Image: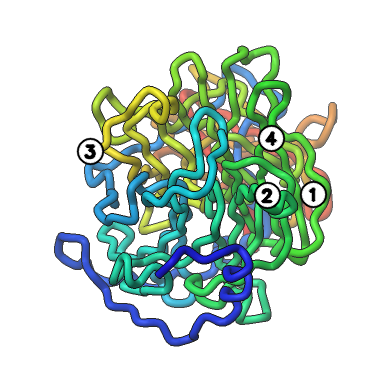
Amino acid sequence: MPHPTRRAFLRHTSRLAAALPLAHAALGGAERPTLPPPAVPSPPNGTLREILFSPGNITERKNCYDRLEPLKKPAQNPLLTAQMPWEKSGICWGSVLRSAVDGKFKFFYSTDFPGAQEGAVTVDNSMQGKNHCVVCYAESDDGLVWRRPALDLFFKDQFPGNNIVLTWAAYYNDSPSVIEDMHERDPLRRYKLMMFHLDTKNRDLTGCCLFVSPDGLRWTFTGTVLPAQDASCLWQDRRTGRYYAFLKDRLGNNRSRMLAHSDDFTTWSEPQWIFTPDHGDHDGTNFYNQSAFTLSGRTLGFLNLYDLTTQTTWVELVESGDNHTWRRMPSRARVLQPGAPGSYDNGGAYVGLAEPILVGDDYRYYYYASADRHDAADTGGNPAQRPSLAYATFRRDRLVGQQTEHDGAFATLPFVCPGGRLFLNFVCTGEVTVSIKRPGYGGDYETFTNADCVPVTGDHLRREIVWKTQLTLDALKGKYIRLKISGRNVVAYSAAIEI
C-alpha cells in the first residue's frame, strides 16, 4: 500500500470500516489469568475528603522532612521490544491504559520504518524525514504479556498482519498521548489522542494535533492544532472531565513546559509556562515531558528532566493544588532513574503518557525506556537494543508523604471540615497521635488535642483515629481545621475523612 498523502489521510480517517479483524498473535510466554475489569476511579466508599501529605499541603514542621518513595523496576522488564519490520526506531513514546469498559490493557505507541520522503528537517539534534512515522496498538489481559493484533489498516501489502492504527505523511510524528474519556456522551469520541505533527507543506498543521476515535483503532483528525513542539502529553482529570495539554516549547535554549486546558476538547486556553529552569538548574537542564494523575485527592505528575551534560533522562515527582499551578518537590529527588550501563534503560527513563494503573496493592507506571543516550541519533546507538516498554511500581497511596526524626510533628494546610470519621495512612513502631488545630494562631480545638487523642501504632493504610470524648469530626463540621500528626520516627502518607 503506498504511503497516503496528507489530503488522502484527512479524507480516509473518517471512512475506515467499523469491523476490524483482531487476530491476536501472542508475543511469547503463557497467557496470564484475565484480571477483573477495573471500576472508574473514585474515592473509597463514603470518603468526603482525602488529604495527601505532600510538600505543598504542609505548613508547620518539627523534626520533619518530606518523604518520597523511589519507583521499583520489576525483573520482567522490558515488557515489549521492537520485533517487527515496521518498528525500526523501537517501541517509543506511548500510553498504556486499562479500559474501564472491558478491563483490557491497551498500549498506543510511536515507531517508524525506512521510507525516505522528499527532503529532511532537523528536530532537536536529529534529522527527520528519513522514515515513515506511525502509531501502533498492542493489548494485554494482565499488562505483562502483550500481543499485536493483526489489524491491517495501513500498509497491508508491505507489512501483512501489522498493528498500525495511525499514519500521517509528515517529517515527524511524536508522542501519541491517548485517553479513554468516560465523561464523553458521544460514543464516536470515546478515545482522544494528541500527537505532535511536523508538516513542511502546510505549516498550519504543525503542532499538537487532536484526534477522536470510537475504539482507539479508527482515528479522525478534529482539525484542532495546539501550538507546541514535540514531547507533549494529554491528560483528563476524571473528577471533573476537564482536559489538560502539557506542551513543550523553549525558554531561550532550554526545553520547558507549558499548559493549556479545555472543557470540550475544542476550545482551548492559551498556553502558560508551568516549568522553566530556575536558579537551582544549569544551562544543560531541560524539561522534556510531563504526565499527570491524582492520588489521595491531590494532583501529582511525573516530570522528565533531560541533562545535556550527561545526555541522560530521569523522572521527578511534581504536584499541583489546582491543576494549573505546578511545583517541583523541594528535594527534587529522582523517583525513576536510568538503569546500569548496558541495561534496557541506561540512556533514559522517559515518562509514559498515561496515568499509573492500580493492580492489587501496587500502582504500575508504564514508561518509555531507552538503552541509548539522547545524542545516539548523531553519535550512533546500539541497533540491537532499541527503545522498549517498561514499567515501575509504587505501593498504593504511598508515593509521597512526611517523616519525623525522633519526636516530630507536622500540620496540614487549613481546609473546611466535612465531619465524619478520620483515617490515617502511616507506618510507625511507636505511638502516633493526631490533633485538630484551628487555622492561624488559634491553637487546638478543645477535646481534639494531642493529649485527647487515643494513640495508634503499626503499619496501616487506613487506621481510624478517635479522641477520648470524640469518635468523629462531626462537632467541627463546616469549620476550618488543620490536621497535626505527631510521633517518634513516623512515616505518614495521607488521611481520609469519611461519613
Where does the image place residue 447, in percent across and percent down from the top left? 72, 42
Give coordinates of residue 230: x percent, y percent: 60, 42
112 or 444, which is in the foreground?
112
**Numbered disc 3: secondary structure:** loop
Which residue position is annotated with label 4? 249
Tag of residue 384? 3
Which is in the foreground here, disc 4 or disc 2? 2
Q: Residue at horizontal 68%, vertical 38%?
A: 483
Quadrant showing the N terminus: bottom left
Q: What is the distance, in whole Å, between disc 4 and disc 3 at their CAs?
A: 32 Å
Name of the residue lying farthest toward the front: 118
Q: Is residue 157 above or below residue 67?
A: below
Which secondary structure lies at badge 2?
Answer: loop
Q: Determine contact: label 4, label 3, CB under 8 Å.
A: no
Query: CB under 8 Å between callouts 1 and 2?
Result: no
Q: Residues within 10 Å of mark 3 (few under 14, many from 20)?
A: few
- Residue type marked 3: Ala
Pointers 3 and 1 in contact (CB under 8 A)? no
In this view, the mark in front (4 or 3): 3
> Which residue position is annotated with label 2?
206
N-terminal of the pair, mark 1 or mark 2, is: 2
